[in-house]
Image (cartoon, grey):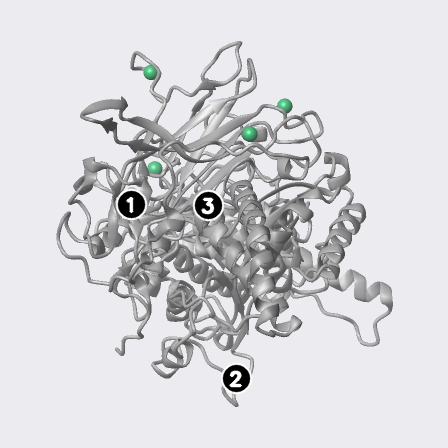
Amino acid sequence: MKKIPSNKTFAVLGLVAACATVLMWSRQDAQQQSLGAPGDAFAASSRASGSFGGASLRSVAHAAPTPRNDAQAKLGGGQLLEAVQWLAQTQAANASSSTAATTGAAASGSSGSAQGAAKQAISAAAQIAALDRAGIPRRFREGEKVKVNLDLALSFEDVQNPSLLDRATSTLRETLLAAGMQATQVNGSPVLEALVPLAKLEWVAGLQSVAQVSLMKMSQTAVFSDGATASNIDHLRTLGNYDQLAENLRRDLRGESLNIAIIDHFGNLNGEVAALQAAGEWPRNTAAEPNKITMRALQGQAFGHRGAAHGNAVTEIVYDIAPAASFRVYDSSGAADWVSAVQDAANLDAQNVSQGEPRSQVITASLGFDLYGPGDGTGTGSGLKGLYDAIEAATRNGVLVLNAAGNEAQKHWDGNSTAGAVANVRQDFDLSAAGVDTVNRLNLGADFGGCIPVGAFSAEDQDDFEVSATLGWNDWTNANNLTDADYRLELVRWADAVRRNGRVITPAGWVVATQSDELQNGGAGQTPLEGVSFIPSAATRTAECNGVFNANRFAGGGKFGLRVVRKTAGANNFLRLMIGGYYTPQYAQAERSLVHPADSASVITVAALDAATSNLEAYSSRGPVLAAGGARPNGQAVGNAKPDMANFANVDTVSYGDNEFNGTSSATPHVAALALLGLQHQRQLTNATVPVLPANPTEQQRAAHALALRQRNVSLAGSVQDSLTYVAGTGGNDLGVAGFDSSYGTGRLKFHAQSQACFLSALYDPAYRGLLPAQANPLPAGQKSYDVLHGENDTACSDAVAQ
Ligand SMILES: [Ca+2]
Ligand SMILES: [Ca+2]
Ligand SMILES: [Ca+2]
Ligand SMILES: [Ca+2]
């Protein structure tokens, strides 16, 4: 097989990019390997001379920025505010020097327009310098512009009113467009995604309809294919040859006449798609099949503009299992495009009203957002409301929706806030140990002694070793609650002692490197979230990490941790932290580490197993979902136990290489493709009851026919999900603790010899009788009732022997 060149190392988002929002998951240790052992020569990226310059050097003590007006108070008290204030400072400094420069220019006869152009150029450079100085990663930037979420100042009731919500978001969007900025609505959510020049950020924050401004939430990919073999797919394919089917209906299941939607991060900067198609690894359009694949790019971008191999590999897996299906692939980045993709694939309008039969019968996403909503299975109060609503509407239109569980099990901590009647209390991360353990250290791995590389010389290394974290707590705005418990998230670093004449002037200790402190005081549109995404500069290094990292690539090493400050006296909350990138926290909690929207009851959530051993992957995010509003749950949520089932990671793809595609990202498309084949099977068996539209139909007949089709699609999807669940719970597939558990869910989706019985058991379930022709009453001699068939198949499925 031909290898497609890809920038594999860090295209794998899950681990790396740690986008505040969408996660891609790839394998952590593979990433760390690329760093090499401590002190050895990493693959040399040439040192850009002077690229870590004075701009990133700053004094040891970080002075938390103080907002100077109401607009600045909406900037989150951290990096955005710092950047705005630094820009103001440099502009003030330039104002005096530019007077002199202008005089000089006039004397040398420069034209006014040239001066104007020069001034503009300086202004853009100054904005970029201020963004650099605040340590804001490139993924949030385009030149002097920064990608932000604008939360609208709307009450809970306002958000529940779709027309009011749409009016408010479209009005703000038009205001921004009129001012020359890009802004996109997230259908159904009280938030805009906008691209704003730093110089205009304060003006935007000052708009009355804006509640708060934060770095844009982006999805991450959950990354790592032999899974098709491991899943015993042949057992499933042959179900299409069921001997009780009419001959003309029998065929091996390969996805004929069905469509699957894949929402992901794709790569096509160097002809990857054409190469994969030429190699037979991807679907392609031909004269015989002109609509085999539909590719949707992000607005204003070419398909695959980010060069991420992730979605390419996911599509390879689905195509392996369901080669006769047709495909819709959607490039994704934030929440707005994800919502639109779900609505398009499910054939819904922007208000989630069904426009007819779904374009895709299955939608799969190996993506997720870290901590951007309550985590209780809903998007209530959050910028993800629109996504949860769209997915639920898709299932009501008969679509099966799948999502990766996430790769965050080792990158998550939660716990009760430290109690007390006073304000400004630091969180104790270890209640079992005496003293207040206020710093939750971030580690790169056992080999690096608690050090992480700082002052990276190349832009690529800066991107890869970004430090990011999100804090959230259970104080979401809803019908009975305002967001008014205030916390602050501090990213701290170890500062060496300062000596003068051999004497210690300032002892070594933890100092704040940057922080996030959004307002939480009950104002409309506020959310209980704080987040940092930070590129550590050379100035953050410590002598304790000297020699740990390759000096050709990094200025040195630093030690970092997270501190949480409860600002509101007496506030008592369930706190959660999620860490991005390669780093794991010292205090961690694997349970409850699902990403969004893996907690939705409307998705089938997939955990990851090692393909060779069926052991749960340590990174695979665990259930259960949280209690209402994001509170600590007491066991699994009724009707929404998570994850749903598990499948294989560590698989081969051309896009990543042998055994390289790891993560819940690779497990999920296996289940999605198997679900598509399962649907093909259930459709074959129920072909006799497809509702028929009468000739010359009346409007009423058309509406009744559409409704009957929709109900049928919902029933088919339900019977497929049940079938997969039965297979995953039988024949030796129940792994870990006996019965459903929060690691494997029901169990491993590996088809066994009694899989046919499991599918029939689901089909004959009383819930889905509408799919079957009515039986004669009394039954003809020798014919079994559906109830009897249900019971027999249920028993055969349950008795399946481990393979
Ligand atoms: Ca303690
Ligand atoms: Ca409250
Ligand atoms: Ca706060
Ligand atoms: Ca189990």
Visible in this render: residue 693?
A: yes
Q: Is residue 741 above or below residue 509?
A: below
Q: Which residue is mark 3?
A: 134
**Front label number (3 vs 2):** 3
**Front label number (2 vs 1):** 1
Residue neighbourhood size for the residue with mark 2, other residues' Cα within 10 Å, grouped as few (<14), some (14–19), many (≥20): few
Q: Is residue 534 left or right of residue 610?
A: right
For badge 3, the amino acid type reads Ala
**Front label number (3 vs 1):** 3
Residue 289's label in the rendered image is 2
Circles 2, 1 touching at the beta carbon (< 8 Å):
no
> How far separated are the C-alphas under marks 3 and 1?
36 Å
For badge 1, the amino acid type reads Glu
Residue neighbourhood size for the residue with mark 1, other residues' Cα within 10 Å, grouped as few (<14), some (14–19), many (≥20): many
For badge 2, the amino acid type reads Glu
Circles 3, 1 touching at the beta carbon (< 8 Å):
no
Q: Residue at x 36, y 39 (%)?
A: 411
Q: Is residue 763 left or right of residue 698?
A: left
Foreground residue among 325 and 690: 325
Mark 2: is the Cβ under 8 angstroms from ligand 4?
no
Mark 1: is the Cβ under 8 angstroms from ligand 4?
no
Q: Is residue 795 above or below residue 157?
A: below
Residue 617's label in the rendered image is 1
> How far separated are the C-alphas under marks 3 and 2?
51 Å
> How far separated are the C-alphas under marks 2 and 1?
39 Å
Decide which of tag 3 and tag 2 comes sooner along the chain.
3
Q: Is residue 272 above or below residue 91?
A: below
Foreground residue among 575 and 720: 575
Decide which of tag 2 and tag 1 comes sooner along the chain.
2
Q: Residue at x 19, y 48 (%)?
A: 549
Quadrant of ligand 2 in image = top right
Residue 110's label in the rendered image is none
